[in-house]
Amino acid sequence: MDRKRIACVTGGTSGIGRGITEQFLKEDYIVYAIGRGSQHAEELKTANRNDALHVLIGDICDVIFQKEIFSEIEKTHGLLDVLVNSAGKLVLSESGGGILETLDAWRETFDINLFSLIGMTQSLYPLLKKGSLASVINISSVCSLYPFDTCSSNAYSASKAGVDLLTKRLAQQLAPEGIRVNAINPGVVHSNIMASAKLSVEQQQAFKDRILEKRHPLGRLGHPKDVAHAASYLASEQAEWVTGTLLSVDGGYGVS
């Protein structure tokens, strides 16, 4: 290819998304990292002083912002090779994550984890059609696959199960256009998702300790780079015959 590949990573300024952004930069991609807050954006830019990195800040649940992302990529490049839908949120309501989990928590979870995902995919679809070895990679969760009690939110698990099925549906529908669609289902990864769920440092550590004891037989939690390496593979020519797959990167969570 006589040009750099172009990727867009939602949630690309922190956690798993940042790991994927930085992996793609190492591979000489032009990367549009989409974030919600300025602090994480500045930290990303400070750590990666690279002209190939473009950071856009806004609410990806907002249709207007989705169109702005499209316009920014379209006017500069006219195409997109890889879309990674990594933005996600764990919403913990005061009533807990069981049967009494509030409908407001369900709505907020689905808005970010599922509805923004399809919104971004629809918005950038015209650019993906023009890309080379075009690929959509959705970041799901091991909690979409198993009803373990260590998955603390019904809404989160259900939203990610929606991501899984949508991945397969889109893979089937977009295959004739040469666009591959896959998902990665991580186990528990060191990121800021628990802090954003307003868990205290002590609560976060207690959760991590419980997870290590019960669900990660490889003996450690995941790091963003573990998921980033999987995303690198799925976006590459080595995976050109892979679509509609759910790739578990979970430290053995599913066999524990």
Image (cartoon, helix red, strand yellow):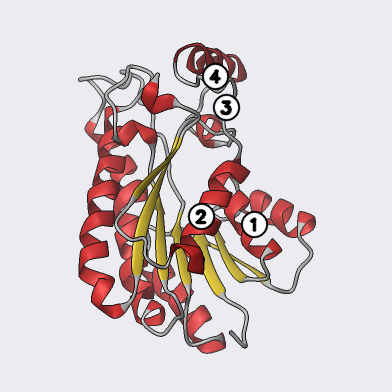
Q: Secondary structure at mark 4?
A: helix
Residue indicated by mark 2: 231
Of circles 4 and 2, the one toward us is: 2
Residue indicated by mark 1: 23
Of circles 4 and 1, the one toward us is: 1
- Give the distance between the C-alpha atoms of the residues marked 3 and 4, in whole angstroms: 8 Å
2 and 1 marks in contact (CB < 8 Å): yes
Q: Position of residue 107 (x, y in %)?
A: 26, 42
Residue indicated by mark 3: 221
Q: Amino acid at mark 2?
A: Ala
- Give the distance between the C-alpha atoms of the residues marked 3 and 2, in whole angstroms: 18 Å
- Give the distance between the C-alpha atoms of the residues marked 4 and 1, in whole angstroms: 25 Å
Q: Amino acid at mark 1?
A: Gln
3 and 2 marks in contact (CB < 8 Å): no
Q: Which one is nearer the viewer's eye here, 83 or 255?
A: 255
The N terminus appears in which quarter of the rendering?
bottom right
3 and 4 marks in contact (CB < 8 Å): yes
The mark nearer the N terminus, 3 or 1, is 1
The mark nearer the N terminus, 3 or 2, is 3
Residue indicated by mark 4: 208
Left or right: 68 in relation to 167: right
Q: Residue at x 53, y 45 (%)?
A: 227
Quadrant in the rendering for residue 203: top right
Left or right: 182 in relation to 71: left
Q: Which one is nearer the viewer's eye here, 162 or 215?
A: 215
Quadrant in the rendering for residue 145: top left
The mark nearer the N terminus, 3 or 4, is 4
Q: Amino acid at mark 3?
A: Leu
Q: Position of residue 255 (x, y in %)?
A: 38, 23
4 and 1 marks in contact (CB < 8 Å): no
Q: Secondary structure at mark 1?
A: helix
- Give the distance between the C-alpha atoms of the residues marked 4 and 2, in whole angstroms: 24 Å
